[in-house]
Image (cartoon, helix red, strand yellow):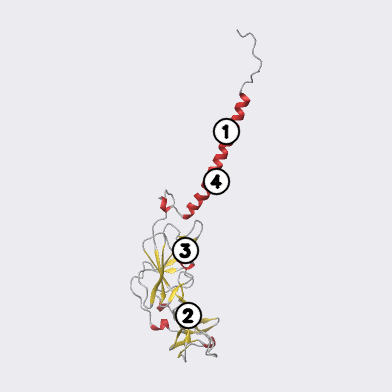
Amino acid sequence: MSSTRNSVYDAYAVWPATNLGPLTTTFTPTPQCFQPIHSGSRISDSYPYAYVYGKHCTTAMYGDALAPLIQDDPSCLPSAIPPGTPSPFYSPGNVCPQGFTTACHMTRGMELSSDLADPTMWEMWKVLQFGETAYKCCPSGYVCAMGPTGCSKSPGGPTTTSGPYITYPDHDSCESTTSIGILSITDYQPGLLLVTSSAQPEQTNGPYPVDQVPLGAQIFIAICAPIAVIALALAGCVLVRTRMHSLRKQSPIYSSVPPENVL
């Protein structure tokens, strides 16, 4: 059973994420899950074919009539992901499906790390709670890309394939056929996000150890502390000047003429 949660990634915003349940054993997709799919005209042999994981040809309502459509194949995932599910992940999860590899991982601690300069790491970090580690599983030959579950082709990854594929010519039928020559492979593939380790409660009341003060607090202290010191110094100067002026007004004024009748 899935559950949606929010992970605080700064003081003002949350990023929704949905736990689809555990994935602690190896899930083995069927060969059809890796079958290339071509969604377009077959007029030109040079037209690029799309190698899309987890798609199949089915019949569904399109407008007012049934029509063949290329849709996600729920059997290609350990558990079905409803459309519109925010940042789906499996937890506890520690085993990538057969045909996938661990492309990257990210642990969320109290501090922002230099890894977040990589936008693909930032996307994973936002769905984590403190103390959790995320692993992104991508099809073999693919690396982490934008989005919590996005994967892109690595420089040495697959570029072409041959053999059976599904074609969807002119969007009027689905056919299984065999390629004549080489099929181009798309640069993008969907991946799976696994989350392990127990979430730790975020410290909000302090005090923090010196090496665990959040980055935002460090920046606030670095900027505001000098300003506060300067403001206190100015206030002290004003107070001293005011006090001295008041004392001068209250002090008696002595004449320079010696008093009379001094014995």
Q: Quadrant of the C terminus?
A: top right
What's the amino acid at mark 4?
Ile
Q: Is residue 246 above or below residue 1?
A: above
What's the amino acid at mark 3?
Leu
Do callouts 1 and 2 mark residues in contact (Cβ within 8 Å)?
no
Name of the residue lying farthest toward the bottom: 180
What's the amino acid at mark 2?
Gln
Residue at mark 2? 71
What's the amino acid at mark 1?
Val
* Element at label 2: strand
Residue 104 appears in the figure: yes
Do callouts 2 and 4 mark residues in contact (Cβ within 8 Å)?
no
In whole angstroms, how far apart are the C-alphas of marks 2 and 3?
A: 34 Å
In whole angstroms, how far apart are the C-alphas of marks 1 and 4?
A: 20 Å
Nearer the observer, disc 1 or disc 2?
A: 1
Q: Residues within 10 Å of mark 3 (few under 14, many from 20)?
A: some
Residue at mark 4? 227
In whole angstroms, how far apart are the C-alphas of marks 4 and 3?
A: 30 Å
Q: What residue appears at the point 57 percent right and 38 percent down from the top-left corner?
A: 235
First-in-chain label (1 vs 2): 2
Residue at mark 1? 240
* Element at label 3: helix
Q: Residues within 10 Å of mark 1 (few under 14, many from 20)?
A: few
Q: Quadrant of the N terminus?
A: bottom left
Q: Which mark is residue 116?
A: 3
First-in-chain label (2 vs 3): 2
Q: Nearer the viewer, residue 127 or 73?
A: 127
Q: Nearer the viewer, residue 262 or 117?
A: 262
> Residue 144: x, y in percent?
45, 72
Q: Residues within 10 Å of mark 4 (few under 14, many from 20)?
A: few
First-in-chain label (2 vs 4): 2
